[in-house]
């Protein structure tokens, strides 16, 4: 199950190239699966397969590692930083608010039984 979920997320990131963090990980029908999706995503970020960046509006996005690296080279201030760690506070209130703000009606990552 673990490897399958990580592989699914990797495939989605490669297909989308850049995707809003919350649109990627939020399952609007399951807080627990949203937490699991964040957990699985951390392995891909740690392995350098994808990275986290921010739009000009400050929204967190997940991107293919090549795209994040190009962003870093373009402006020198963003992109993949292997020595940088991010902390994400994610509770049920944040989950509900993200569903509302980003109008999330379905899960990009398939629902698991």
Image (spheres, rainbow, N blue to C red):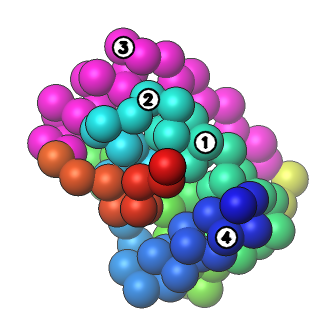
Q: Mark 4 or 3 closer to N-term?
A: 4
Instruction: Count neighbours of disc 2 (C-alpha within 10 A) and say few if under 14, some if 14 to 19, many if 20 or more.
Output: some
Mark 1 neighbour class, 10 Å CA radius: few under 14, some 14 to 19, many 20 or more = some
In the rendered structure, which segment of residues is drawn in magenta?
Answer: 84-104
Label 1, label 3: how many angstroms apart (C-alpha)?
17 Å
Earlier-in-chain disc, 1 versus 4: 4
If the image is split into quadrants, where does the N terminus sit?
bottom right
Reading the chain from its start, which is encountered first: label 2 or label 1? Answer: 2
* Residue bearing mark 3: 93
Where is residue 4? Give x, y as percent: 67, 70
Q: Quadrant of residue 41?
A: bottom right
Q: Which residue is mark 4?
A: 4
Is 66 left or right of 92, judged from the image as shown? right
For disc 1, the marked residue is 36
Nearest the viewer among 16 and 84 is: 16
In the figure, residue 38 lies in which quadrant?
top right
Query: Is 36 positioned to the left or the right of 74 in the image?
Result: right
Q: Is residue 68 visible?
A: no
Badge 4 density bin: few <14, some 14–19, many ≥20, Cα 10 Å:
few
Q: Is residue 50 above or below residue 66?
A: above
Q: CA distance from mark 2 to mark 4?
A: 20 Å
Q: Judge whether 87 appears above or below 102 on screen.
A: above
């Amino acid at each position: 199950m673990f490897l399958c979920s990580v592989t699914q997320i990797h495939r989605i990131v490669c297909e989308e190239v850049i995707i809003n963090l919350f649109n990627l990980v939020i399952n609007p029908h399951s807080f627990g699966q949203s937490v699991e999706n964040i957990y699985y995503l951390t392995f891909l970020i740690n392995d350098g397969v994808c990275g986290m960046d921010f739009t000009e509006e400050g929204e967190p996005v997940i991107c293919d590692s090549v795209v994040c690296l190009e962003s870093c080279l373009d402006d020198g201030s963003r992109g993949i930083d292997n020595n940088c760690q991010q902390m994400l506070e994610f509770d049920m209130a944040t989950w509900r608010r993200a569903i509302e703000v980003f109008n999330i009606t379905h899960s990009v990552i398939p629902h698991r039984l």
